[in-house]
Image (cartoon, grey):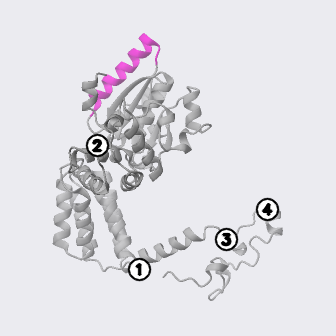
Amino acid sequence: MSEAINNYRPLADRMRPRDFADFAGQKHLVAEGKLLRQMIERDSLLSMIFWGPPGTGKTTLAKIIAHKTGANFLSLSAVMSGKDELRRALAEAEQVVITKKQKTVLFIDEIHRWNKAQQDALLPHVEKGSLILIGATTENPSFEIIGALLSRCRVFVLKELDTFDIARVIKRALTNEAMGLGGQKIDIDEETIFFLAELAGGDARAALNALELALEVRVDKEKMKIDKKVIKEALQRVHLKFDKKGEEFYNLISALHKSMRGSDVNAALYWLARMFEGGADPLYIARRVLRFASEDIGMANGEAMIQANTAYDACYKIGYPECSVHLAQAVVYCAKAKKSNLLYRAYNQAAEDARHTSHLGVPLHLCNAPTKLMKELNYGKGYKYNPDYDGPVEQDYLPEELKGRKYL
């Protein structure tokens, strides 16, 4: 690729690793001896689904797989492509097999965006092995991928990158002279690198986009100094730049959430409409409303979660734009419902205890004793089976160290 063309490519694209040595995170999949790594090294690939948050390396991993196995690589976006593009890709895959005796890896980004008919079209080709399908999704494949296709694919879960993984990605971009920023002698200290890595929220692509933008927004254009203030401004602009309609996406969902919390039905409907008419994914909005139903209403009105969950189900079954009224119903119900965050606070307190007491074992009387040895070790001994008693049963259910702890 010429240097002129390369300069127009985003940093995140230029820095896409071609080998496992530069691939950050996902050690549970690609470390030596792990299943996926073995499949690649033995060239014994099956069609697969990569499920994970944005910026975790789904596309990069698919390209590494194709490169390592010597396969022809074809890529489609389910958002931008339809059946015509798929037909052309499938025809090319068959031609490559015939003329070059080479298999094809077909990568479909956001495969959950395709409807049943489009996913069905993949089935015969996956079934006969004329290509290796790698589908990428940020949504649960159990709900978004048709059963027939899912049963023919291995699902690999990609995890959100941690701060150290992203810091490693940033440092590689800063030092790589051929494809990165190594030739620019950028002044950025270790603390600022980790500051950017932490604020990127597990998304390596967002971190590199912000780093690239930080070079443009710095006050002193003569000096290549990047500090925390510049990073903050760059990250704000990245969120605006990549929002579907140019809106402050996370501000909108915050406004919707706070309007429902404040029981302002009119404001809640307005912010819902702003998001929906702006092209936001209805399922994303529905998930946020479902979360609100427990976080801000909870036990004050158990019906709220049923309303929110039903709205989510309607959005999934009916889709955009018909599901607008179902979302509106759930939002209005939640806005008008009595509020309580007792459940939310109670869980957070329990979670705090859980994080600090994970070393505590389960009390023996609460343990099952399926073997003779376990019975001899007093597993289950002294447990009182509640239905056998007419009244309340005096029995401890927490570890001794947390005895008497109250969350609700």
Tag 3: residue type? Val
Q: Is residue 145 visible?
A: no
Residue beneath label 1, please? 342
Residue beneath label 3, please? 362
Q: In terms of sequence position, does the residue under pointer 4 or pointer 3 come before the other?
A: 3
Disc 3 crowd, CA 10 A, few/some/many (<14, 14-19, 20+): few
Q: CA distance from mark 2 to mark 3?
A: 50 Å
Tag 2: residue type? Glu
Disc 1 crowd, CA 10 A, few/some/many (<14, 14-19, 20+): some
Q: CA distance from mark 4 to mark 3?
A: 17 Å
Residue 381 to residue 10: above or below: below
Residue beneath label 4, please? 371
**Mark 2 residue element:** helix
Q: In terms of sequence position, does the residue under pointer 4 or pointer 1 come before the other?
A: 1
Q: Nearer the viewer, residue 216 or 288?
A: 216
Q: In terms of sequence position, does the residue under pointer 4 or pointer 2 come before the other?
A: 2
Disc 2 crowd, CA 10 A, few/some/many (<14, 14-19, 20+): many
**Mark 1 residue element:** helix
